[in-house]
Image (spheres, helix red, strand yellow):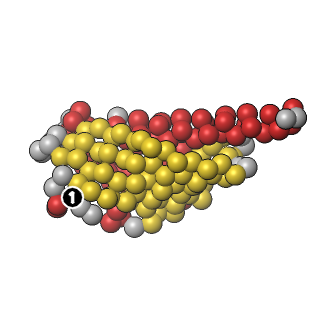
Amino acid sequence: MSLADLEKRMQAFEDLEAIKKLHQKYISLMDNILYDKVPDLFTDDATVEIRQHGVKRGKKEINDVYQMIKGFYKGGVARHIGHMCVEPDINVNGNNAKGTWLIYFFDSIPKQSWVQGINDCEYRKVNGKWLISKLKFTRTLASDPALFP
């Protein structure tokens, strides 16, 4: 194996790890109700589709939908939610990547409940930094039928 081949493989591993860390940061911001920082993780032309809220395009619309979601957690409810993202399946192709994550959302107010879903994502490296260029969350299962889909 040539040095160029090793460098290419190493870059692929570094890109994969950077994408995982990016998505973990997204989940952490969600858990801590830091929705004001969420748009910074997206490209300027990104799209977000979260359940019945439709497709949002660009950082302004993305910010608007996350601010709306933030409104659900006023009054300390944020202390009673949590997200878990597992089973990443990420494919890097140069400065672009696609990935899926299995997501679990846990809530204990007003009652204990959970939701399972899939984050289908696309990522793009912009000026050497990985960002989310597309995120679609689809619920696949829930503890309460009223929460699904």
Going by the numbered disc 1, the residue's amino acid type is Leu
Tell which residue pokes out farthest to the left in this image. Answer: 111
- Dividing the picture into quadrants, the one containing residue 111 is top left
Left or right of 93: which side holds 89?
A: left
Tell which residue pokes out farthest to the front in this image. Answer: 1
The percent coordinates of residue 13 (x first, y second) are 66, 36
Q: How many marks do you count on the picture?
A: 1
Q: Kindly identify the residue that appears in the image at 30 percent across and 51 percent down.
A: 116
Left or right of 81: which side holds 45?
A: right
Quarter holding the N terminus is top right
Q: Mark 1 points at which residue?
A: 147
Whether residue 62 can be seen here: no
The percent coordinates of residue 90 (x first, y second) are 57, 48
Front-lying residue, 9 or 145: 9
Q: Kindly identify the residue that appears in the image at 65 percent across and 48 percent down.
A: 92
Front-lying residue, 111 or 42: 111
Quarter holding the C terminus is bottom left
The percent coordinates of residue 72 (x first, y second) are 25, 49
Q: In this view, does 63 lie above or below 24?
A: below
Which SS class for mark 1? Answer: helix
Whether residue 114 can be seen here: yes
Density class for disc 1 (Cα within 10 Å; few <14, some 14-19, many ≥20) is few
The percent coordinates of residue 18 (x first, y second) are 60, 36
Q: Kindly identify the residue that appears in the image at 63 percent across and 43 percent down.
A: 130
- Dividing the picture into quadrants, the one containing residue 45 is bottom right
